[in-house]
Amino acid sequence: MEVFQGPVLGPSRLLGLGGAYAGVAEGVDGVASNVAAPAVRAPYSSHHVDYDLTASVSIPGSFSSTDFENRGSVPTGQQTSSASNFIYGNAGVLLQVGPFGAAFTIDASSYTLATNQNGLDFHVLGSPAIVRAHAIVGWAFMNYQLVVGVGVCGVAMSLGADALPLAPPSGIGPEAGLLLRLDDQPWRLGVSARAPVNGGIGGDVTTAADGVKSATGNGQSYILPTSVVLPAQIDVGFALQLGPRPLNPKWFDPSGELEPLRQTIEDQRIERAKHDADEIARTPAGPLRAKLRRELDANERAIRRLEDVRVDAEEKRIQADHGARYTNWPRAKLLLVLDAVITVPVSNAVAVSSFFNQQLESYGRSWTISPRLGLEGEPVVDRFRLRFGTYLEPSLFDGGSARQHFTFGGDLKLFQWNAFGLLAKTEWQLSFATDLAPRYTNWGLSIGVWR
């Protein structure tokens, strides 16, 4: 059984850009598109140690049942399946230390799968739920111009059929990605790949002599797939930013700028230690030497306190310079992003709905490609960002046709707030995104930091 996500599900910016984000790959939101994202330094990053957080919820098909698997039209007289009560959520955290980055993200989706015959005899088949997690580390090379990331993707799925005594299948697989962002160039190129993730089906399962597995529920015997598979995917992305706002400004590590001062202070401490040791050696042993040692130690502690204050002040100055540099850049821009998501075929696969319907339908047995396009600008400077996107969702069913999606979204700058004193004074934003296609709708909201 193949678990394939055709429609774009993800954070608001990703959804608003039609899923085209592998060539941008900034922040924790970028992990969903490019494994290199954890070590990509955003232009607004001004600390040697930095972090990013994300959390969002979207509700696909909230106004009606949705054809989530893109079955398309079904001839009269055949049984159809649709998904309703769909909800999707994601959360993640990213930590960066110099050129190193690490991220952990998790997303979950659940829906009710129902079937009917010519619009009659509505029957709930089950409520599948899928949880995916990414644990990734990355490193920036060539002065942050080439970023590489590696990690693992874990998947667990609940079939949501209480009558079937099955253990939730789960598995993990490797993934890797890279991003090329040359200093002061208006473009980026990203590539990310994920190996297939397989999870075996266990529980109260009967295996026949021919190897066919089955389980019984509600007095009915269900033929089971041998495993649940998240197919391998390759995502190639390109980003181009037009206008005066830079896409790839050279990133300077504040710790590196502070290093000359730290080295000067360290050299001075070594010289003072030598001078103090010589002075102590020239003093006769006894009370005079002990008194001198106490005086020199007290003097050293006082000098070091002043040096620490000097380092702290210089660090704040450097960070303020970084912040001012970012703030003073012109905001006018038009970001163009292009992606191609390639899905690798899975032999002898069936769809989730086919399993519940106990129908053997050819599914996911050929290569597919999903081209994606997104645009982002700031029509109201320093107040409102707007995004448009479109993507082609392939159908994995034999004879099925691809459908076109149109997405839009944006960020609205709200107000400054320090989160009850937990954070520095921060400017917040409200983000939204919508995805419209035949037999499918999706919308979501999120709160984040205005950049």
Image (spheres, rainbow, N blue to C red):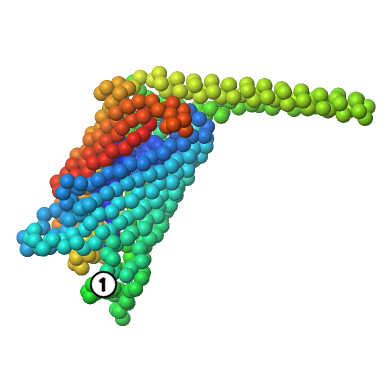
Return the residue nearer the eye: 374 or 12: 12
| Left or right of 389 in this view: 155 | right
Seen in the picture, residue 313 relative to 82 is either above or below; the reply is above
The mark tally for this picture is: 1
Name the residue rendered at 46%, 28% in the picture: 424
| Left or right of 322 in this view: 367 | left
Expressed as whole percent of the image width and height from the top left, the position of residue 126 reads: 24, 62
Expressed as whole percent of the image width and height from the top left, the position of residue 193 reads: 37, 49
Name the residue rendered at 56%, 29% in the picture: 255
Inspect the image, locate mark 1, and give the three-letter code of the amino acid beneath it: Gly
Residue that sits furthest to the bottom in the current view: 209
Seen in the picture, residue 8 relative to 414 is either above or below; the reply is below
Return the residue nearer the eye: 400 or 382: 382
Tell me where residue 18 sits by quadrant.
top left
Residue that sits furthest to the front in the current view: 420
Expressed as whole percent of the image width and height from the top left, the position of residue 172 reads: 41, 57
Expressed as whole percent of the image width and height from the top left, the position of residue 23 reads: 35, 37
Which quarter of the rendered picture does the N terminus lie within? bottom left
Tell me where residue 92 sits by quadrant.
top left
Residue at disc 1, secondary structure: strand
Name the residue rendered at 22%, 39% in the picture: 434
Name the residue rendered at 86%, 26% in the picture: 291
Look at mark 1 in the image and give the residue it sits on.
Answer: 217
Q: Residues within 10 Å of mark 1 (few under 14, many from 20)?
A: few
Return the residue nearer the eye: 421 or 173: 421
The answer to whether residue 146 shows anywhere in this view is no
| Left or right of 36 in this view: 361 | left
The answer to whether residue 270 shows anywhere in this view is yes
Seen in the picture, residue 393 relative to 416 is either above or below; the reply is below
Which quarter of the rendered picture does the C terminus lie within? top left
